[in-house]
Image (cartoon, rainbow, N blue to C red):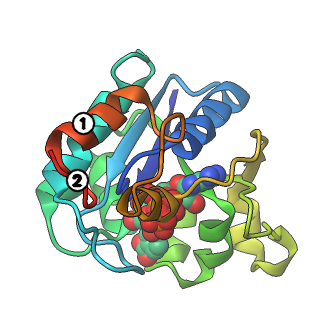
């Protein structure tokens, strides 16, 4: 059974932290591919400022050079609030042969008890959790059935977030090397996040 990782997020915009997390999970769990999946409306935070099409295009630009990384537009096509449980049900119908691993940073691991349909979700996939500066990942604090579904991976800690990238762009600061060059070019060319095209 092929192992596939899913890196879900708003990707507003995609940054180096996302790519390093996906690569660490791929390497440490022998994932054949990692699918980068922008959410339509995130379940727990404000809707992204940039359109789904543009967030997907940035993900396409960021993943193009890596044959193991693929963009996945399933949540953008479905619309509405992007509950992961709905997406995984759909993906398992389409790909019953895959062993799915959902990749998340420490902030999201700690939030797992509040995810919609978490009991069903832990029966359908495994999570790969990564430490992230600013949120300490504490497995012991989680209910048993969630702890059993979460596997840990190591990555070089990087204190980069999409909010930091947006804030820096809006105040005219450099985000070079925080996002891939292709994404930087896309942001500048499209005049996103307060830049003039
Ligand atoms: N620097 C990072 N290290 C590890 N995981 C990360 C990092 N940045 C984001 N993630 C994880 O990537 C997933 C998608 O994150 P998302 O697209 O919401 O980015 P974000 O940087 O958290 O955004 P924002 O700052 O707008 O809240 C989440 O599981 C999040 O925990
Ligand atoms: O389904 C849920 O209840 C749920 C709650 C919080 C987060 N998620 C998913 O986790 C991924 C990372 O979330 P975020 O908010 O950090 O972009 C993204 O794919 C979200 O849809 C899912």
Q: Nearer the viewer, residue 194 or 41?
A: 194
Contact, CB < 8 Å: mark 2 with mark 1?
yes
Q: Is residue 84 visible?
A: yes
| Residue situated furthest front in the rendering | 172
In what element is the residue under mark 1? helix
Mark 2 nearby-residue class (10 Å; few <14, some 14–19, many ≥20): some
For image coordinates 25% across by 75% down, the residue present is 81
Count of numbered circles on the image: 2
Residue bearing the label numbered 1 = 186
Q: Is mark 1 within 8 Å of ligand 1?
A: no
Q: Residue 87 in the image: x percent, y percent?
A: 31, 59
Compared across the picture, whether 105 is left or right of 16 comes to right
Residue bearing the label numbered 2 = 192
Q: Residue 1 in the image: x percent, y percent?
A: 51, 27
Residue 61, picture quadrant = top left
Is residue 78 positioned above or below 190 on the image?
below
């Amino acid at each position: 059974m092929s192992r596939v990782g899913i890196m879900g997020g708003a990707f507003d915009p995609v940054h180096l932290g996302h790519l390093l997390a996906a690569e660490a999970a791929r390497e440490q769990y022998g994932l054949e591919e990692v699918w980068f999946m922008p959410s339509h409306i995130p379940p727990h935070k404000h809707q992204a400022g940039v359109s789904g099409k543009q967030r997907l295009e940035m993900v396409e630009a960021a993943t193009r050079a890596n044959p193991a990384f693929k963009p996945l537009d399933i949540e953008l096509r479905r619309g509405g609030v992007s509950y992961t449980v709905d997406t995984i049900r759909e993906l398992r119908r389409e790909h019953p042969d895959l062993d799915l691993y959902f990749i998340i940073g420490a902030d999201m691991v700690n939030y797992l008890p509040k995810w919609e349909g978490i009991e069903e979700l832990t029966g359908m996939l495994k999570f790969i959790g990564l430490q992230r500066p600013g949120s300490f990942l504490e497995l012991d604090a989680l209910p048993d059935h969630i702890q059993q579904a979460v596997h840990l991976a190591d990555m070089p800690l990087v204190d980069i977030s999409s909010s930091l990238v947006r804030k820096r762009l809006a105040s005219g600061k450099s985000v070079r090397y925080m996002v891939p060059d292709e994404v930087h070019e896309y942001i500048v060319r499209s005049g996103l996040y307060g830049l003039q095209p």
